Image: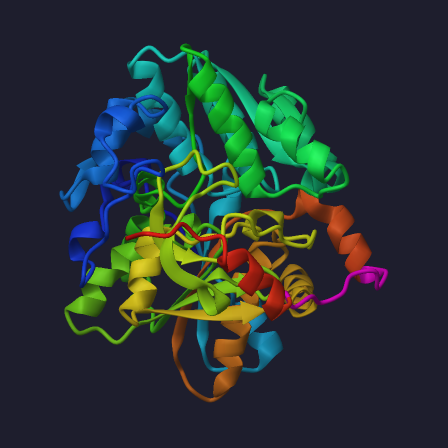
Amino acid sequence: MKKIVLRDDEMPKVWYNVAPDIPGGLLPPLDPQTLKPISPEKLGAIFPQGLLEQEMSTERFIPIPEEVQEIYRIWRPSPLVRANKLEEALGVKAKIYFKNESVSPVGSHKPNSAVAQAWFNKREGVKRLTTETGAGQWGSALCFATSKFGMQCKVYMVRVSYDQKPYRKFMMQTYGGQVVASPSMDTKVGRDILARTPDTPGSLGMAVSEALEEALDREDTNYALGSVLNHVALHQTIIGLEAKKQMELAGDFPDVIIGCCGGGSNFAGLACPFVPDYLEGKKIRFLGCEPASCPSLTNGKLAYDAGDVAMLTPLLYMYTLGHTFVPPGFHAGGLRYHGMAPVISALTREGIVEPVALQQLECFEAGLLFARTEGIIPAPESTHAIRGAIIEALRDPKEPKTILFNLSGTGVIDLPSYDKYLQGELQDYEYPQEDIAKSLASLPKIP
């Protein structure tokens, strides 16, 4: 069976919250000013109550509102696909499956959370959202979602991606969004950064600061985050919940589950619903594949840190490279974030998730092989998961293991990046250890 598709009425009606099941639990977010657990009232200045309840929830399953399900049905349930042509090309006995999240209207997994966040904000009377975006997939998703609910959206897009990926900008504008390159002159944070470093490529941390500043300055505006926070990971678990049903229909179960890791949302979405099976004794390996040029899991520190350069966000206990970290302009723009989702960080801390750092060129090579065997051009971010799957399949070509990875997005809009790879214009980049140490020195000092 090449492709397994669930019926509309088989789409999950709940999200799965992994937080109550994490051994050792999660540490609470801290107020960056007091360094004490942050109050719901302070978070309420930028997030609606419905999302705050999800962020702090200890319930294992949370119902998906019918209005959100209705929009999900435009593209969900998404297919589970057997990558048998890739298996043949590799000459392995492993069975490789991928969850195809590239089938959404914007070509990625991001609308799973964007639609939910827009709906909860709309329900509480919010008219406008601000956000940041790296590669543009989250910005596109939120503009799509706000268009569905008659809301406005402004996106601060990391400058290097704004220049590299113009079609993502056009997509956001098509859905009615306003897009500016970050850092920008629209905020005090942006103006200050440009005054100090006018040629900066930007970073997600900078873009978060700009979006947050604007949300805090306007009563009609809330902020929406595309990854990292618990409620974002929660919304993405519809991926793994569907995959469990589809693997059952295939008469199979994964030995290895793989996703690319930037902020952690797509990997959490696929992996977290399988964590209870692991805790009940199933032998599953969870591999989080991140770029060697932004290695928060493999080379960062588990500590409290801000999610942005201006330290406007709550302090999260996560693997981080430091909120002042400015990554190089490599082409997997969605993986250029300095910190990892607290739930993925906690699962890594407990030894449940194994982090893997991969280089840019080996990932593009994997993406080309996938395109030429399975016919789908993957996003540069998703090539990290594909490379991880190939490494696992080739570890012992004669071992009949089952590998499941998340194809988090399409690369059709990223063809200029593939062109640069094919022309030999890309290179690997390992972030210097001394620069990471310098960035980590800026971590907040928690008593």
* 373 vs 138: above or below: below
* 304 vs 402: above or below: above
Q: Between 229 and 268, which is closer to the camera in this rendering?
A: 229
**Where in the figure is residue 158, as x and y percent of width and height?**
64, 38
> Which residue is located at x 26 percent, y 55 percent?
273
Describe residue 117's horizontal placement relative to residue 438 as left or right: left
Q: Between 433 and 416, which is closer to the camera in this rendering?
A: 433
* 344 vs 109: above or below: below
Is 428 contained in the magenta span? yes
**Where in the figure is residue 296, as x and y percent of width and height?**
48, 60
Q: Main secondary structure of the magenta part?
A: loop
Residue 433 seen in the current view: yes
Quadrant showing the N terminus:
bottom left
**For residue 257, which quarter of the picture?**
bottom left
Q: What span is colored magenta in the figure?
A: 422-431
Q: Between 24 and 100, which is closer to the camera in this rendering?
A: 24
> Which residue is located at x 63 percent, y 56 percent?
375
**Where in the figure is residue 344, as x and y percent of width and height?**
35, 57
Query: How is the protein colored in the picture?
Result: rainbow
Describe residue 10's horizontal placement relative to residue 430 as left or right: left
**For residue 61, which quarter of the picture?**
top left
Residue 65 seen in the current view: no
Is 339 contained in the magenta span? no
**Where in the figure is residue 334, as x and y percent of width and height?**
57, 47
Describe residue 197's horizontal placement relative to residue 99 as left or right: right
> Which residue is located at x 69 percent, y 67 percent?
365
> Which residue is located at x 25 percent, y 31 percent?
52
Q: How many marks?
A: 0
